[in-house]
Image (spheres, grey):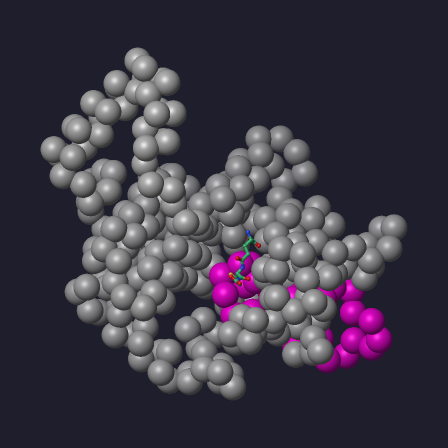
């Protein structure tokens, strides 16, 4: 059963206009922030990733991709409409309400550009979370790669915000909402906001908005793990705290934007020569593939 948890307007009777399916994670929080900023009524169905609610048939019927967030707009033109993918949901809500996305012109595409950028780069940040905090053993190569890539994204944001208060269109938009919920987890990504002063100032500006504050706390505040039958809240909190401070997990980002492959210069030169040779004799590739042992997966 998918059970409604929060109704942000106690006076609403009957069917609510929009239902959000989400959990306490960056992508669903974008949607509750939008709703609070826009002052819209909504019903929130709180799902648990620990109990694999995203894989249950009743949720897969709403989002076959098995990820949060998803929404149902009961009041959409032409009948109830289901939308999933946080970027698509934000765009839909912005167009429906006429808020936080310019209707046309440069500002509209600037905004969409940053929303698309955020959604397509979120997996780098998400992988930083995964390899720094949740894998059973530290994996140096992966921690380095995703911490460095996260740092590159923060450098880009910091440069972009040098002469701007907001990410796009000279005003608060869905681009800011989309980016904010991920920057909330900068510590997990191995980033110190003091290294990115423009991002830090923007982050503070965002955090001062009442709608952003309220929406960030749905279904509960960031870093607050709710008890679940399968997980000990305090144990998870303690494990994360330990990993964030332990040298083998908290490998810092390199200052330079370099490719981290864990390879030495010698190995790199060898691989480069091999590629140059293959470029000259492409048939050699088929021969080498036949000779190399088959991978099992
Ligand atoms: N591209 C999707 C990503 C959604 C996503 O991965 N959501 C996470 C929560 S932030 C999730 O549902 N994770 C569950 C899982 O990985 O099984 C979006 O932006 O909506």
- Residue found at x 31% / y 80%: 238
- Residue found at x 72% / y 61%: 62
Residue 3 left/right relative to 168: right
Residue 120 vertical placement versus 7 (above, below): above
Residue 102 left/right relative to 212: right
- Residue found at x 45% / y 71%: 222
Percent position of residue 26, x then y: 49, 61
Percent position of residue 207, x then y: 44, 63
Which stretch appears magenta? 6-33
Percent position of residue 32, x then y: 60, 64
- Where, by quadrant of the figure, is residue 282 drawn? top left
Residue lying furthest left: 266
On whether residue 18 falls in the magenta region, the answer is yes
- Where, by quadrant of the figure, is residue 279 drawn? top left
Residue 162 left/right relative to 79: left
Q: Is residue 232 visible?
A: yes
Residue lying furthest top: 280
Residue 286 vertical placement versus 234 (above, below): above
Number of labelled discs?
Answer: 0
Residue lying furthest right: 78
Residue 196 vertical placement versus 212 (above, below): above
Q: Quadrant of ligand 1?
A: bottom right
Front residue (pair 262, 291): 291
Percent position of residue 182, x then y: 44, 57
């Amino acid at each position: 059963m998918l059970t409604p948890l929060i109704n942000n307007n106690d006076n609403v009777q009957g069917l609510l206009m929009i239902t959000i399916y989400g959990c306490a994670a960056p992508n669903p929080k974008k949607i509750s922030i939008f709703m609070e900023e826009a002052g819209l009524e909504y019903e929130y169905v709180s799902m648990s990733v620990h109990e694999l609610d995203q894989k249950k048939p009743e949720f897969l019927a709403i989002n076959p991709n098995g990820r949060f967030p998803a929404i149902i707009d009961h009041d959409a033109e032409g009948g109830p409409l289901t939308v999933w993918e946080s970027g698509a949901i934000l765009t839909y809500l912005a167009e429906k309400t006429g808020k936080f996305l310019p209707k046309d012109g440069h500002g509209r595409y600037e905004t969409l550009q940053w929303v698309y950028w955020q959604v397509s780069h979120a997996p780098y940040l998400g992988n930083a979370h995964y390899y720094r905090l949740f894998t059973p053993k530290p994996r140096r190569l992966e921690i380095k790669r995703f911490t460095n890539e996260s740092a590159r994204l923060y450098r880009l944001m910091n440069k972009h915000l040098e002469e701007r208060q907001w990410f796009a269109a000279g005003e608060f938009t869905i681009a800011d909402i989309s980016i904010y919920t991920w920057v909330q987890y900068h510590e997990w990504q191995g980033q110190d906001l003091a290294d990115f002063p423009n991002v830090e100032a923007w982050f503070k500006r965002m955090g001062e908005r009442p709608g952003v504050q309220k929406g960030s706390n749905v279904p509960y505040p960031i870093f607050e793990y709710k008890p679940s039958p399968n997980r000990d809240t305090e144990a998870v909190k303690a494990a994360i705290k330990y990993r964030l401070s332990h040298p083998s997990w908290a490998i810092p980002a390199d200052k330079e934007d370099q490719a981290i492959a864990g390879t030495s210069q010698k190995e790199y030169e060898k691989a480069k020569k091999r590629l140059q040779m293959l470029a000259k004799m492409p048939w050699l590739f088929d021969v080498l593939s036949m000779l190399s042992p088959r991978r099992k997966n």
